Image (spheres, rainbow, N blue to C red):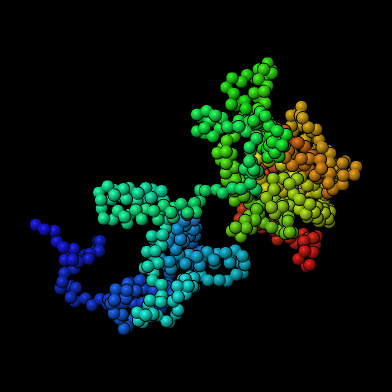
Amino acid sequence: MEEPSPLDIDYTQKCARKRSESKTSRLPKADFQLKIHENELNKHHLQDLADGKEVPEEVTVEAAQREVDYHFGDSGAQWRMTKLKGVYRRAEETGRSIDDVAEEQFGDLRTFDNAREEQTEFDRRATYGEGYVGKEKPSGELFEERKLDLGLRKGNQPTNNDQINDIPHAIEIEALAATTAPLDQTALNRLKAQMLKAKVRGSSDAAALEAEYNNAVASFANRKRPDVVVLGAMDNRMLAGSREGEITAIDNKRGRERGLVEENEDMSIDDMVKQERRTRNQVGGDGQRFAERIAKDPKFDNNLEYMDENANKLAKRLQKSEINLKNTAVTDFQKMSRILDNCPLCYHEDTDTPPVAPVVSLATRVYLTLPTEPEISDGGACIIPVQHRGNLLECDDDEWEEIRNFMKSLTRMYHDQGRDVVFYENAAVPQRKKHAGMEVAPLPYSLGKTAPAFFKEAILTSDEEWTQHKKLINTLAKAKQGAGKLAFRRTLAKEMPYFHVWFEIDGGLGHIVEDANRWPKGDLFAREIIGGMLDVAPDVIKRQGRWNKGGDRRVEGFRQRWRKFDWTTVLTDG
């Protein structure tokens, strides 16, 4: 018995009912006439033309717009937007074209273009607000533009082979994209295994497989890999210049295999200066380097006798190999990138996304926003630099000029309301790289005069009893002694964790935070002081909210009070 030929078997659809010849003979004859969309390129029709078949004379043109069973913003909108973002993310990770990934995810490019059109409509609604009236369903304009880019014009379908040859073939384009798409490492290994098997067996296609493998290796090496980070000396100064003269290679088997190095004990003065410039003001400083040296010493004993006997050993700087330096630089870069991507106060230029926090007033380098809810004092604000800064001491002169302008205008506004105001900055944990900002807390006039006493008492009792720095740094007194508006910037160092409160525009009280573990989390230190002055409930004091997308109901009311004192109108009028 032989297996029947595939040509003798009719096509059957799964789960379809069997029909007898008598029933099918009574049914109307199916219409297999080829139909071409008004602006759509039919792939099967082009393939038939390429094979030399005749073109049907009668072509039925369908409607240009395809009807969909959903509208923008319905229950499935979030799922479609998530799917659309997944297409862009997968295309970036794999290096493939967006159209190829879109066809896999959506099934066809028309559905993908409809999702793009819906995303554009959502952006317009968010930009123009509630009064905007736009589309409710996709119009197909993006798909029309795609076909125009391929050389197709509405109402001008080709009718002969000469015109067809002038139009790019969709089938050939898809085949070209499939062959030029870079393979991943697993597919590359499988292709290499096929090539080796063909060579061992002496197959006729061994040469073709070898050429295909070589092309795939070349495309794999030249593709843009998302897991590769390219850093230069501007990103990390530890990578700048050569360390020749500062280190010596460890000449043993383990050292040669891992590229281990140690500090050069015969450094010249120039080498010492170069090393100091490269390593100064690093996070942790000498204390962290001493801790690393202790961790590498298995015989370390925490007593003065051992430290005196091994002073030279403990004083040596622990040098990292080139590989460790690069890994550390990449880790720091990736950590900072994640912080910037998730920062609610940063303006993301790559995606043209404004900050999550509401922007009340915008200058050239600094903007004014509202604090998170619940507010510790009604009508407060925040002064934020546009660029991501670790603390306000890192700001330049132009940024400080705008910060002082906001402080002056806010002081006038609160005085017009019959209230006093204090400004404070909490930069107690610099290693978290949070976006710097100055908090604004209005107070009644009666409490404004006693506010310095409240903050002084709280600072004196907050940290350890014995500290290396003064517990109180009176920047206001130094401003009155001649330092002026530079008293704060000349008194504190930007590398130190600190807390500072301004009772006047030129200064106030500062404190160096030596033990961050004992310092209250987040903004709790200032909230407890101001909340105690205003008799705020304890649960409101401890709740520290976040900025959320979707607007803030407080913005319009604050803008109406602020409009009279807004100094940024001078910039727009000019």
Is residue 414 left or right of 37 when viewed as pictured? right
Location of residue 500 with respect to 164 vertically, above or below: above
> Which residue is the extreme one toward the left?
1
Q: In which quarter of the view is residue 53 placed?
A: bottom left
Seen from the viewer's position, the closer of residues 527 and 188 is 188
> Which residue is the extreme one toward the right?
481
**At 59% across and 42% down in the image, what residue appears?**
329
Seen from the viewer's position, the closer of residues 3 and 184 is 184
Location of residue 281 with respect to 228 vertically, above or below: above
Seen from the viewer's position, the closer of residues 138 and 55 is 55
Is residue 248 left or right of 285 when viewed as pictured? left
> Residue 43: horizontal and vertical position, in percent?
35, 71
Seen from the viewer's position, the closer of residues 190 and 380 is 190
> Residue 406: horizontal and vertical position, in percent?
78, 55
> Residue 284: horizontal and vertical position, in percent?
67, 35
> Residue 290: horizontal and vertical position, in percent?
66, 28
| Residue 236 visible | yes
Q: In which quarter of the view is residue 508 placed?
A: top right
